Amino acid sequence: MKRIIFILLSSCSAIITSAQREPADSIAALLEQHPQQDTVRLNLLISFANTYAEVDISKGIAAADEAILLAKKLGAPQLGKAYFAKALNYMNNDEYSQVLKTLDIAIPAFIAAGDSMGLARTYFGKGLAYFNISAYDTAILQHQKALNIYKALGEQKRMANVLNSIGANYRNLSNYPKAIDYYLEALSKYETTGSTNETAMTLSNIGMIYKDIEDYSHALGYYEKALDTYRQLNDKKGLAKTLTNMGIAYDGLKNGDKALGYFQQALKISEELDLRIEICTNLAEIGIIYKDRKEYETALPYFKKAMDIAVELGNKRSIGTLHNHIGAVLLHCSDALLKKEGIKPADRYSKVLEHQFAGLKLAKENGLLYEISNSLGLISELYEAKGDYKQSLEYHKQFTALRDSIFSDKSTMEIARKGVQYEFEKKEVLTKAENEKQQALAAAEINRQRIIKNSVMAGTGILLLGAVSSFVFYKRRRDAEISKAAAEFKAQVSETEMKALRAQMNPHFIFNSLNSISDYISRNDLKNADHYLSKFAKIMRMILENSEQKEVPLADDLKALELYMQLESARMNNRFSYEINVAADIDIENTLIPPLILQPFVENSIWHGLSQKKGNGRIIINITKQQNMLNCTVEDNGIGREAAAKDTRPDKKSLGMKITKARIDIINKLKKSNAGVMLTDLAEGTKVEVKLPLELSF
């Protein structure tokens, strides 16, 4: 993998700062008005230090030092907070060794004061500092300590912050299943607490997981959601980081011009905000674009500027990866560029090896599997250029073994499964909640009508109003029955929709698809595995998105249906073919149809008709228009219904047709139409005819 993942600290420094600060000048004025050496001044000094961490770090540290001395003099419990404020200033100045030293002093102060919240924030801060110096295992240990305290305190949003950071550490250790576990848990908590900014940050982080496994299309989907939110919030930091990530994704899609545009936008914002980590990242990424274009003389200055910042920050990961890139430039560049850099052409290989072994050493020290893999690959390439094929082969073997372990079939499928599972469970919860809401409304309406009935009956003793009361009672009872029936019908609609979604997300289909991907990988057929996985992820997304709609364009529904048949055909070694014919007088973009209404019948054709057939099968789908009805037929040349009925295996029992008929019954009630399903036995196979009311979007 040519792309080196640079650290994008998309949330960390902001998380531990206060969400709302008093204006710096207001606090300074209050300090001038209160010179007394008491707890009031102490609290003002701590607020001043926290505020100036983002305004003037030297003033922030000076205020924190004064607060520390005053807290010690007063024996005040705010001593830990004073140290924390000082550490925050060091954090914003990227002085991570000072952050760790200061927070180590803060820990006993918080313990002595019995301040659990302060202690948790301190462990979290230490984790962020270790993250920034690429000590990911140590960072995780500190974050776990913070997480345990926040759990005990019931701090949901702070728990989400820690979960997000743990996910970032596991991602940098290339442990993607664990990373996505933590990201999804954080995302769930953020959505529950209505944390818009943090939700965007987590979506971006999940996008980076997909980027790391080179699924750039899915990565861009998450980035674009995050980008929209950051623009709405006018969050320039989030905007800069997401633009960088989008550039990396477009470069992965071989669209270097678009990638370069995103990197340059991100670099401009990062320089305006003086985000040195982001400046380093974007300089390096721009250098990569030019290196890949073999424009080495343009690439090298970007790498050298990025290296200066990485060394200044003590960012070992970036230093190591930049060694690799600089080594690659020196390996392939002209002799003239070498001389310009003060390197003799005869010393080319030794200088390149110096950079590449430096990169490998840093990667191994920090357990960075991706970077180790890249270094091994580059060293193998160098020895091949030198003509030392034995050494080249040895390093290439190490490179291949490590890369295969990173992209193991279990990891890739686990990520796909967890992503689909999260989206599906989220959808199912929403549908179930709507169903329960409708049932509650029905119960409330029935109870209300019962009260009305009792009230009316109490007045039936008055003969003069008897007739009127009887009429009112009858009418209200009828209205109650109508309301009850309507509420029950709505509940039936919700329940049917949920069942339809479950049928479309058929677990047999999901697990069979994942098994097919696993089979491709076990046979080292990575091209087909990637092709199959891409289609599988696409159809899952289409099913989930379309299930939110009552009706979708016929064109979209046929795309989903074709994807389904492609996957099933591939899984069955292409034992059946298919064709979809749409009459010329049908506008598929503007004709609406209930989502995936035909899929259960196609599934039946495959599972019941064609799976047991000897020889090649065929499925033909025809869409025609008859007056105000849309006529859809699914025809197969399978073994027929009579033979299929003898197959009693449990996994062959499908509820799809029953649910579809229930959906059509609902359509008839809502639209007062004559929609229906008719099955016909053919000489060879079965034909299903589905008639639906013709609906247009205009």
Image (cartoon, rainbow, N blue to C red):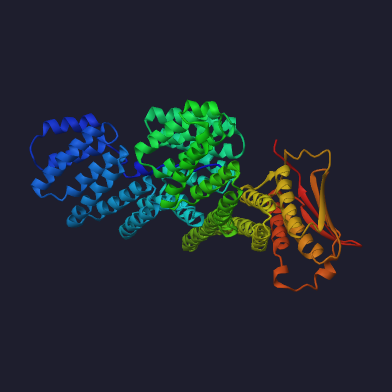
Task: Locate the N terminus and report the quarter of the image it occupies.
Answer: top right
Q: Nearer the viewer, residue 419 or 447?
A: 419
- Specify whether residue 216 is in view: yes
| Quadrant in the rendering for residue 577 | bottom right
Tell me: 77 left or right of 373. Answer: left
| Quadrant in the rendering for residue 311 | top left
Q: Nearer the viewer, residue 624 or 244?
A: 244
Q: Residue at x 59, y 31 (%)?
A: 293
Q: Nearer the viewer, residue 181 or 316?
A: 316
Task: Give residue 578's position: percent from left, percent from top.
Answer: 81, 52
Task: Give residue 582's position: percent from left, percent from top.
Answer: 82, 44
Task: Locate the C terminus and report the quarter of the image it occupies.
Answer: top right
Furthest residue in direction front, as rendered: 346
Task: Give residue 528's position: percent from left, percent from top.
Answer: 70, 52
In the image, residue 399 sits, relative to residue 216, either above or below, namely below
Task: Give residue 470's position: percent from left, percent from top.
Answer: 56, 59
Tell me: 559 left or right of 291. Answer: right
Q: Residue at x 13, y 41 (%)?
A: 40
In the image, residue 303 sits, relative to residue 687, either above or below, namely above
- Specify whether residue 597 is in view: no
Q: Residue at x 92, y 62 (%)?
A: 683
